[in-house]
Image: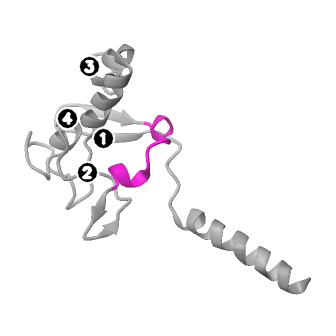
């Protein structure tokens, strides 16, 4: 009986540990402060996307840093280049990893009625 209880507790703990180790997504939208505009990024509608899709591997390790963190995509003036926040958000084709507009374009291909909301500039979900 004792052995069964220990095994059951070990199994539950093994399943729970990865969930406890992963950071939780912020409740409030994050602000992407670009050179010209600020964009609010809500995590809730993106919950079905794996975190590693956007928080890609850095030096072989998962990073949950903000995109505009120092050393990441912190060039707020450039329109091109892997350090450019603008490029990481607006490039439609994948760079080394998925981009915001690249992912939104894939969703719109499946659900054309979302085109204005997900890929439009003015009065879209990104630029209200």
What secondary structure is found at the residue carrying circle 1? strand
Quote the CA–CA distance across marks 1 and 3. 17 Å
Query: Is 123 positioned to the left or the right of 16 in the image?
Result: left
Residue that sits furthest to the right in the current view: 1
Q: Residue at x 14, y 47 (%)?
A: 84
Q: Which residue is mark 2?
A: 68
- The residue labelled by disc 1 is 32
Callouts 1 and 2 close, C-beta under 8 Å = yes
Above or below, 45 relative to 12: above
Mark positioned earlier in the residue sequence (1 or 3): 1
Looking at the rendered structure, which numbered label has been put on residue 120? 3
**Label 1 vs 2, first from the N-terminus:** 1
Decide which of 58, 107 is in the foreground and name it.
107
Q: Position of residue 109 (x, y in %)?
A: 31, 24
Number of the front mark, 4 or 2: 4
Which circle, 1 or 4, is nearer the viewer?
4
Q: Is residue 74 left or right of residue 41?
A: left
Mark 1 and mark 4: Cα distance apart in space: 13 Å
Question: Can you tell which of label 3 and label 2 is closer to the viewer?
Answer: 3
Residue 110 image point, x, y percent: 36, 24
* Pointers 1 and 4 in contact (C-beta within 8 Å): no
* Image quadrant containing the C terminus: top left
- In space, the residues marked 1 and 2 are separated at their CA atoms by 7 Å
**Nearer the observer, 34 or 59:** 59
- Name the N-terminal-most of marks 1 and 4: 1
**Residue at the (34%, 55%) spot, across then down:** 55
CB within 8 Å, label 3 to label 2? no
Query: Residue 90, labelled with which disc?
Result: 4
Image coordinates of residue 99 in percent, x first then y, are: 25, 42
> Is-magenta flag for residue 53?
yes
- Residue range corresponding to the magenta coloring: 42-55
21 magenta-colored: no
């Amino acid at each position: 009986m004792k052995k069964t209880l220990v095994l059951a507790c070990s199994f539950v703990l093994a399943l729970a540990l990865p969930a406890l180790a992963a950071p939780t997504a912020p409740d409030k939208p994050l602000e992407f402060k670009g050179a010209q505009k600020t964009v609010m990024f809500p995590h809730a509608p993106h919950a079905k996307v794996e975190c590693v899709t956007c928080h890609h591997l850095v030096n072989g390790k998962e990073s949950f840093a903000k995109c505009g963190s120092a050393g990441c995509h912190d060039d707020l003036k450039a329109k091109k280049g892997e350090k450019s926040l603008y490029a990481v958000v607006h490039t439609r084709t994948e760079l080394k990893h998925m981009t915001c507009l690249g992912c939104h374009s894939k969703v719109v291909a499946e659900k054309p009625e979302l085109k204005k909301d997900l890929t439009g500039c003015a009065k879209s979900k990104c630029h209200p």
